[in-house]
Image (tube, helix red, strand yellow):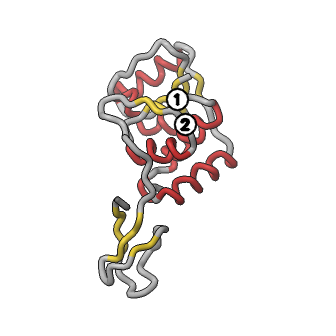
């Protein structure tokens, strides 16, 4: 089964496999893309609502990888639905791919190249330069903003 992100409807993704999505994806779509969602649903696409437990599991994985701030609630729910349905997540979103990889969820990309490796982001203070493993609102040492940084 393939679980479709909004980019699948925007880019007119086609597959012969069974499909699924979540209600929040339809809410993100406009015009023809929303009509494609309706058509896919009318053709048998399963619309799934993931459990709160699965959403918390995905949120934890996203926090650990440093991707949480990059993901919307819809993104988190899509990954949770893919996890529950043992589905392949169809998305071009790199942060979603990174978290999916961490949770052993298969991913297919649409219009871009997919990620080549899983990353655990670091956060660096713009003021004092210290690095932290977790995202914080401000640097606990000097109070400056933190920026996400590639750990490599």
Compared to residue 58, the image places residue 20 above or below, namely above
Residue located at (49% from left, 56% from top):
65
Residue density around tag 1, few if under 14, some if 14–19, many if 20 or more, within 10 Å = many
Compared to residue 121, the image places residue 27 above or below, namely above
Q: Viewer-proximal residue, 123 or 111? A: 123
- Reading the image, the residue beneath label 2 is 105
Task: Name the secondary structure under disc 1.
Answer: strand
Disc number placed over residue 104 in the picture, else none = none
Q: Assign the N terminus to one quadrant of the image.
A: top right
Marks 2 and 1: in contact by CB < 8 Å?
Answer: yes
Q: Residue furthest bottom?
A: 142
Measured Cα–Cα span from mark 1 to mark 2 = 7 Å
Across and down, in percent, residue 22 comes to 55, 34
Task: Name the secondary structure under disc 2.
Answer: loop
Left or right: residue 20 compared with residue 6 = right
Across and down, in percent, residue 87 comes to 57, 29
Q: Assign the C terminus to one quadrant of the image.
A: bottom left
Residue located at (38% from left, 22% from top):
13
Residue density around tag 2, few if under 14, some if 14–19, many if 20 or more, within 10 Å = some
Across and down, in percent, residue 118 comes to 44, 47
Residue located at (43% from left, 87% from top):
141
Compared to residue 70, the image places residue 5 above or below, namely above
Across and down, in percent, residue 56 comes to 63, 52
Q: Looking at the image, tell me whether mark 1 or mark 2 is earlier in sequence order.
A: 1
Left or right: residue 72 compared with residue 7 = right
Q: Viewer-proximal residue, 129 or 33? A: 129
Residue located at (55% from left, 36% from top):
105
- Reading the image, the residue beneath label 1 is 88
Q: Residue furthest front?
A: 152
Q: In which quarter of the image is residue 5?
A: top left
Q: In which quarter of the image is residue 143?
A: bottom left
Q: Viewer-proximal residue, 68 or 22? A: 68
């Amino acid at each position: 089964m393939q679980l479709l992100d909004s980019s699948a409807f925007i880019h007119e993704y086609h597959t012969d496999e069974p499909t699924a999505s979540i209600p929040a994806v339809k809410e993100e779509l406009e015009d023809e893309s929303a009509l494609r969602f309706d058509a896919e649903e009318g053709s048998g696409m399963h619309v799934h609502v993931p459990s709160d437990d699965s959403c918390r599991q995905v949120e934890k994985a996203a926090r650990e990888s440093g991707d949480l701030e990059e993901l919307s609630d819809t993104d988190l729910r899509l990954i949770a639905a893919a996890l529950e349905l043992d589905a392949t997540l169809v998305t071009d979103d790199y942060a979603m791919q990174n978290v999916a990889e961490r949770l052993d969820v298969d991913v297919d990309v649409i219009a871009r190249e997919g990620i080549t490796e899983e990353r655990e982001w670091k956060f660096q203070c713009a003021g004092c330069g210290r690095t932290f493993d977790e995202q914080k609102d401000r640097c606990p040492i000097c109070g400056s903003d933190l920026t996400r940084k590639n750990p490599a």
